[in-house]
Amino acid sequence: MLQNQIRYTLGKEERLKSRKIIELLFKEGKSFSNFPFRVVWKYLPQESNIILQAGFTVSSKHFKKAVDRNRTRRLMKEAYRLQKNGLQQNLGHSNKRLGIFFIYVGKEIPDYALVFEKIAVIIGRLQKIVNEKSSTNS
């Protein structure tokens, strides 16, 4: 069995649950859009050992039924879970912590292929941001 096998998990500690951190993220964080997503991110204080935390939300204004909101949120989490490892490694090398919040702003339920593709673009953009910050600090 491989020693360095990559695990694609999204555990409880990797989800953004702290109200204090979420408020800080929306108050002081930076954001960008990649339709149908808006992403809010911020470097977090070095208090805990979790490198990357993410939160996901879908507007109840556009999706009246909880079933539709939950489905969209589940798709977002799955796409993120499978693609976050590269970003996590970058953050580990630059010794930073990052909080990300994904907000779905589209008006219809997306298919998984679209969500996967857009999350890949978003994670790529975040990796560039992390790399730029770590190279300017060195």
Image (cartoon, rainbow, N blue to C red):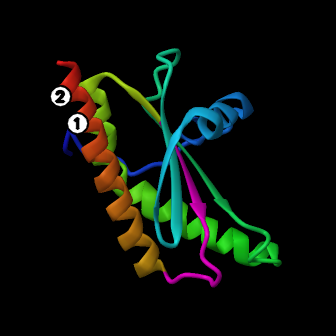
As displayed, is residue 92 above or below residue 128? above
Rendered image: mark on residue 132: 1
Image height check: is 129 above or below 65? Answer: above
Mark 2 and mark 1 residues within 8 Å of each other at the beta carbon:
yes
> Amino acid under label 1?
Glu
At a point 51% along the width and 18% down the height, the residue shown is 48
Q: Mark 2 points at which residue?
A: 135
- Residue 134 falls within the magenta-colored stretch: no
Q: Where is residue 126 in the image (x, y as percent from the top left)?
A: 34, 47
- Measured from the top left, where is residue 41 in percent x and y? 49, 42
Residue drawn at the location 52% of the way across and 15% of the way down: 47
The answer to if 108 sits in the magenta stretch is yes
Q: What element does badge 2 sit on?
A: helix
Instruction: Indicate whether 48 appears above or below 15.
Output: above
Q: Nearer the viewer, residue 1 or 136?
A: 136
Q: In which quarter of the image is residue 93?
A: top left
Three-letter residue code for mark 2: Ser
For this view, does 5 lie left or right of residue 75?
Answer: left
Image coords of residue 17 (percent x, y):
68, 38
